[in-house]
Amino acid sequence: METSYEDFEPSCKWRRDQNCDKLEVHLSGFRRQQLKVEIHSSGILEISGERLMDEGKSKRIISRFRKEFPISEDYQRTQIHAKFYNGILHLVMPKEIVPTISSPAGGGGDEDNDGKASSSGTSYLTCLMKLNKNIALDIMILAISLAIVVAYVKKYCQCSSLE
């Protein structure tokens, strides 16, 4: 018996949220057992499936598809899950939670009036750079203050150990 394959491209719809991204793959006529979802160590999400379309005396026709998507490192790969119902494969890909650091009081930055980091989010790296600038400024102020105190003590105190 001869087997022929009909490749097709399923319709896909992405929905991006703050905490996770969702992918819907429309696969009417498929059953869950005919689908395969894999995440490869190379960071590729592979979705594939095959189903028998028609079987005659001398020929079988199998409909199949294969989709690959690169998975960002922003996702919690061990938490990605899929559900199939009503002919739609639903994939949920939770994002890694990256802590945001709000700037010290009066430090400016991406803040609302209440002093909390904005929901639009300042990237972790940007916050870290702002924090490092503030720490460097504090160290410089302390060094200058220390130099002033030492100069004052040398001038007005009778301490021989500072000479």
Image: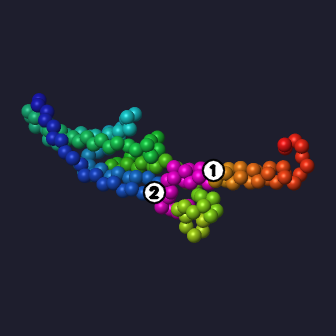
Q: Which mark, by number, is residue 73?
A: none
User: What residue occupies the far top of the structure in this picture?
Assistant: 1
Q: Residues within 10 Å of mark 2 (few under 14, many from 20)?
A: few
Q: Is residue 124 visible?
A: no
Is 126 in front, or is 145?
Answer: 145
- Residue at x 53%, y 62% (from the top left corner): 110
Res 3 quadrant in image: top left
Is 11 in front, or is 19?
Answer: 19
Q: Is residue 147 left or right of residue 91?
A: right
Q: Residues within 10 Å of mark 1 (few under 14, many from 20)?
A: few
Res 45 quadrant in image: top left
The residue tagged 1 is 136
Identify residue type, mark 1: Ala
Q: Magenta residues, as a range?
A: 117-136
- Residue at x 56%, y 50% (from the top left corner): 128
The residue tagged 2 is 18
Give the mark toward the camera: 2 or 1. 1
In percent of width and height, residue 124 lies at 52, 51
Report the magenta stretch's main SS: helix
Identify residue type, mark 2: Gln
Question: Residue 92 lies in magenta, yes or no?
Answer: no
